[in-house]
Image (cartoon, coloured by chain):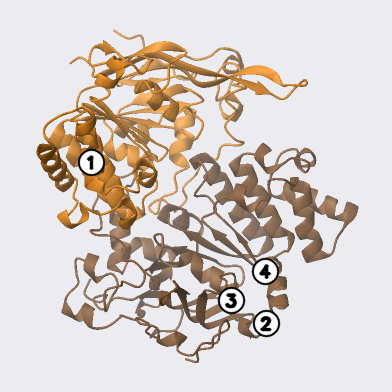
Chain colours: A orange, B brown
Amino acid sequence: MSALLEVDSLVRHYPVRIPGGLFGQPATLRAVDGVSFAVSPGKTLGLVGESGCGKSTTAKLVLGLLPPTAGAVRFEGGHVPARRNAEWRALRQRMQMVYQDPLGALDRRLPVVAQVMEPLTVFKIGTPAERREKARDLMAAVGLTPHLFERFPHELSGGQRQRVVLARALILEPSLLVCDEPISALDVSIQAQVINLLLDLQDRFGVAFLFISHDLKVVRQVSHEVAVMYLGRIVEQGEPEKLFHEPAHPYTKALVSAIPSPWRQEGYERIVLQGDPPNPVQVPSGCAFHPRCAYATAACREVRPVLADIGDGRKAACHLLSPIASA
Amino acid sequence: MSTLDFVGLQPGAATVRGFAPAVAKPIAAQGSGDALVRIAGLTVAFDDGKRHVPVLHGIDLEIRRGETIGIVGESGCGKSVTWLAALRLLGKRARIGGTVSLDGQPMHDFSDAAMARIRGKQIAMIFQDPASSLNPVHRIGRQLAESISLHRGLTGQAARAEALRLLDRVHIPNPGQRLSAYPHELSGGMNQRVMIAMALAGEPDLLVADEPTTALDATIQAQILDLLREIRQDSGMALALISHDLGVIADICDRVMVMYAGRVVEAADSRALFATPGHPYTQGLLAALPDLDAPHRRLEAIAGTVPEPGKLPGGCSFRLRCPHADADCAAEVPGLGHIDKAHQVACLKADSL
């Protein structure tokens, strides 16, 4: 099966100035530094990592909202243009985005049903009556009751607002939905509702997700494949069950063990990493993780490990994991 | 139960709609000695211009010296307001009822000046977003020295030496250098360490930590939780940890209180609460939480949404979302009752669940 979305060696650097001299010194912020992955139709790729690891920048690059410094994004067999031209706008019907804060993503002065049908108006699809009909159908599909349709965003709860955002994103029948922390702003009891809704919508509409989150528990719940990012690079990738139960990369190990859980309290040994993630302006030499890694060797300080097959359909970028030659 | 208003003194604060006196006494923790902080029948109603909207409906809780209590609930359940009311930080629009006592002394007797001395000195508080709690235009060292001189009367070199010791205490590398740094030059985790250092400056008996790790990354959250645990062990300080994250609460707390819509619905020892949750809401929260170690399963979400304050259903506030609710639940607000020696649940069906 050919991939719906293919990302090849994607790089995004920002020129910045760091202190030094009268006007500072020019330096490079490596937000995304060579990321490759593929998403199959109707499947979910989860992208996890801590703040500043480049996961949101990756999302913007995928959607063509930012031009990449190098590398390419292919979607449905075609190139995603780095410019916002007519070709890009046509493509955006097929790929949509959901952000963390639904209130910020909605217009406070319009009733929500008008916002859900707006994409149809923009792309001149159907008559006004048909648009409204379709918007109402979709809002029912995301679990909103009819008496909420004419309300304004501030009259809805956080969970209901995120349902509106989802309905609006799905109304053009996209094949890819990029979700950037879609449930992080919601309450615990509402998070589970929205996770289940996302899974149901995927079953019903066959839409693929690029699901970005810092929350490993949530990513595991929705993903068919997971990629763990650290400082602009993927350090481990694989099936969620295997990746979270037997993490291979030392960073993934620490990340998994750092998650507090009510079910693991007796004698649980947590790996606590020292220090903060390094600044993406001054990425350490060799393996970017080596200053925080308990197993780092001399080679880790000098040679940057590449993401290689480690068997079992998994990939990791670590010198300590002997790469298995792919057949 | 005597109800004393210590702000506003309007009569009838205890009779706001939905108020029901708690039936059972707060759980007495193991060990000897009196409670450090005792909150009894605490009610808070906010004036929205037209009427008073009740947000807390009688909270009872006790914290003993050196113990860690977790307060868990969703946004709007009143977990933060409880402590803001206790420390008299809510302002004039809040109408507060009930009693809060510190070391057996009722706090409504204290003057504003006395309250100012208690805040930070006996009860310190840290918040979710350290960057907005710190002053962006002053150096870390100056802000630390300010609380040191306020609570301990140290100035000059002595204050600076103490600031250095505190930064070292919270494991900030190169503390000497950091004293002259501004908050924006430090990471979120480092700023939260600075906040903890400032809270420790007054050597408080109780630290109230309101979602201290929510804004932080997972690996940094683990560091801060370790630090809080270590400080508590070394100093014997009591800790009240407010969080929406059941994992964080389970990680560090001895006792847990679960709050829903302005009431405590369950209180128990941490282990008992997570092993045998008694209230349908607690059970629902745990069922809705993905477990990374368990086999993959579909989450069981709690239906519906949290009711708005002022629009609570009559009877049990949770009944419209509860799978076990029947006509009895609409009739009265259930009080906390014991289902075990140290395990209280506010549910009419607690025995049959």
Q: Are marks 2 and 3 in contact (CB under 8 Å)?
A: no
The amino acid type found where label 1 is placed reads Val
User: Label 2 near label 1: C-beta < 8 Å?
Assistant: no
Q: Is residue A3 left or right of residue A181?
A: left
Q: What whole-number distance in Å separates the C-alpha atoms at marks 2 and 3?
A: 15 Å
Residue B340 shows which numbered tag?
none
Front residue of A55 and A271: A55
Amino acid at dot 3: Val
Chain identity of mark 2: B
Query: What residue type is disc 2 on?
Result: Phe
- Depth-wise, is mark 3 or mark 1 nearer the camera? 1
Which mark lies nearer to you, 4 or 1? 1
How far is the residue under mark 4 from the one under mark 1? 49 Å
The chain letter under disc 3 is B
Q: CA distance from mark 1 to mark 2?
A: 55 Å
Q: Amino acid at mark 4?
A: Arg
Q: Earlier in the sequence, mark 2 or mark 4?
A: 2
The location of residue B171, given as percent across then percent down, is: 69, 45
Q: Which residue does the numbered mark 2 point to in the structure image? A: B110
Using the image, tell me which numbered label, if any, was put on residue A116. Answer: 1
How crowded is the residue under tag 4: few (<14 C-alpha within 10 Å), some, or many (20+)? some
The mark lying in front, picked from 4 and 3, is 4
SS state under label 1: helix
Question: Which residue matches tag 4?
Answer: B119
Residue B182: name its quadrant: top right
Which residue is labeled 3 in the image?
B37
Quarter of the image with the C terminus of chain A in it: top left
**A156 sits to left or right of A318:** left
Are marks 1 and 2 in one subunit? Answer: no
